[in-house]
Amino acid sequence: MRLPVVGRSVSRRGGCGAIREESKRGAEDLSRAGRDECSRGAALGVRVSVTSVGWVTWVTWGTSLALLVLSVGVGWAADSPTSLEVRLDATLQVDSLVSAKVGALVIGEGGETLYARDPDVSRIPASNMKLLTALAALDAFGPSHRFETVIVADRDLVPTGAVGELGIRGGGDPALNSEDWWRLAADLRRNGLVRVEGDVVVDPSCFDAAYWHPAWGEPSSRAFHAPVAGLSANYGAFFVRVGPGLGSDDPVRVQVDPPLSYFQVQNRGRTLDAGDKGSLSIGRGEATPQAETVVVSGDLGLGEPARNFARSVRDPVLYAGALFKMQLEAVGIEVEGRVRRGIAKQPVELLRHRGRPLAEIVRLFLKYSNNAMAEGLVKAMGAQATGKPGSWPAGLAEVRGRLDALEVLGPGAELVDGSGLSPDNRVSPRVLVEALNRGASSFRFGPEYVAALPIAGRDGTLEHRTAASVDGVRAKTGLLKTQRVVALSGYAERADGESVIFSILINGYSGAPDDAMRAVDAWVEALIQVEPSE
């Protein structure tokens, strides 16, 4: 895949009045003047299409046109739609998008605009916000960065292998899972730890105590609403598996993964007669400093297959501590005390666990659109920038600063969170295309950025979408059902081998979200097609 690399972007100053050359290498992207505000506002009613680019010094529009160009080939065409534009527009003429607001932009390998539809109007991007978070995080930390989790104790292991208190200092690693916590426990056992006589102290103080962003509203128990903390496990989520009982009116069977005593199950579910269809609800009950309640209600027909539900925890820090305690006991380390929150001041370092490289974390949260990981990276950027506990205000200020330095953000961009959960985020298709271009063209992290995106028909959130463009698209999906938003932004390889960068944002679709997503998939499939006239 040859990705479009257009160098430094054109800045539009004074509307259609002027376009200044900013590229130090002599290559210039004139797409911003060719297809949107300038082309519509020019009284001449013509479109400028750049066919070869040299050094552009100044372009001025007025009642007369002065074009001072050195080594530039300019093709003039009537302002009529191309076959690609006609084809792309046709895919959007569906019932679900009749009243929707649609913005889109496609640029080619040379930086020329192939398609533009309100490309500078800011809209709700949903999870396409993660493209900006990933770009800023890779720029801030580099792809090989690893977050560290430190295990400390009140005394050395020698000679008995026992310690009083065991402390865990969180380092903001957003990707620690059950297997990682087992690895920490196994490494401690191998190093000689056999018994913890006191408590396990969990310390999340590298981040602030705000687990949920206020713009998200009331937190739900759904896994995508997982809390964000400086010490966590399994992205702040867990699974509940519910199956029918052995006979009618029996309680349903419930399993929680991971199987922690921290989860107290209230089973109110009943088994219906065979053939009856039931419905289940998995919610939150009361929470204490040592446990939280999982409430299972509803019913399930006899003989129906078991169902899995992903849910978020109330307290990600105590959850991580409970999981670690379970893994310590699983490898033969006795823990006599309890898990409690505190500052891990114990003086003896027993283990320093270096997590996954940032490139792998970015891959995980872009492929599978993991909100908790994205927000954890925002807070981590804030902590690094300020030297204080990571927070959303500090992290988002750092994200904006880095994106501004990369010349990605334009006017009207509103960055409220890092995952796109907030309906108050606003970015334009051009901002997302600029971010994708900067990511792909970066020597430091370009390969990691591009490889992190879902592949059409293969993996991540595109595994079961865009069937007609299998392997031809790498893109980030976006969906906010309540706000009726769908989005898709990424890279595509057209049938003639040309690679393009695209973004399409749809706000206010009607009907089912699947209908809107099918329209987006059809738009992308039309994009990769090439007709002889193109």
Image (tube, grey):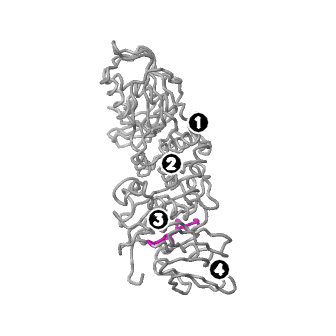
- Determine contact: label 2, label 4, CB under 8 Å: no
What SS does tag 1 mark? loop
Residue 253 percent across, percent down from the top left:
37, 32
List x then y, in percent, for residue 494.
38, 71
Q: Could you tell me how far apart the alpha carbons at marks 1 and 2 are, in whole angstroms?
A: 16 Å
Q: In which quadrant of the rendered view does residue 46 lie?
A: bottom right
Q: Is residue 28 left or right of residue 4?
A: right
Residue that numbered label 4 is attached to: 60
Calculate the distance from the C-alpha at mark 3 to the C-alpha at mark 1. 42 Å
Which residue is the site of mark 2?
A: 140
Label 1 near label 4: C-beta < 8 Å? no
For the residues carrying marks 3 and 1, which lies nearer the camera in this image?
1
Q: Earlier in the sequence, mark 2 or mark 4?
A: 4
Q: Relative to residue 26, is residue 59 drawn left or right?
A: right
Q: Is residue 473 magenta?
A: no
Which is nearer the N-term, disc 1 or disc 2?
2
Q: Earlier in the sequence, mark 4 or mark 1?
A: 4
Pointer 1 residue:
388
Q: Position of residue 21 (x, y in %)?
A: 58, 72
- Say which residue appears at 47% left-offset and 80% top-offset: 52
Q: Nearer the viewer, residue 495 or 270?
A: 495
Which residue, given by chain and number where applicable, does mark 3 sit on?
520
Tell me if residue 130 comes above or below residue 534 in the rendering: above
Q: Residue 217 in the image: state x and y as whole percent.
A: 61, 43
Distance in Å between CA atoms under marks 2 and 4: 38 Å
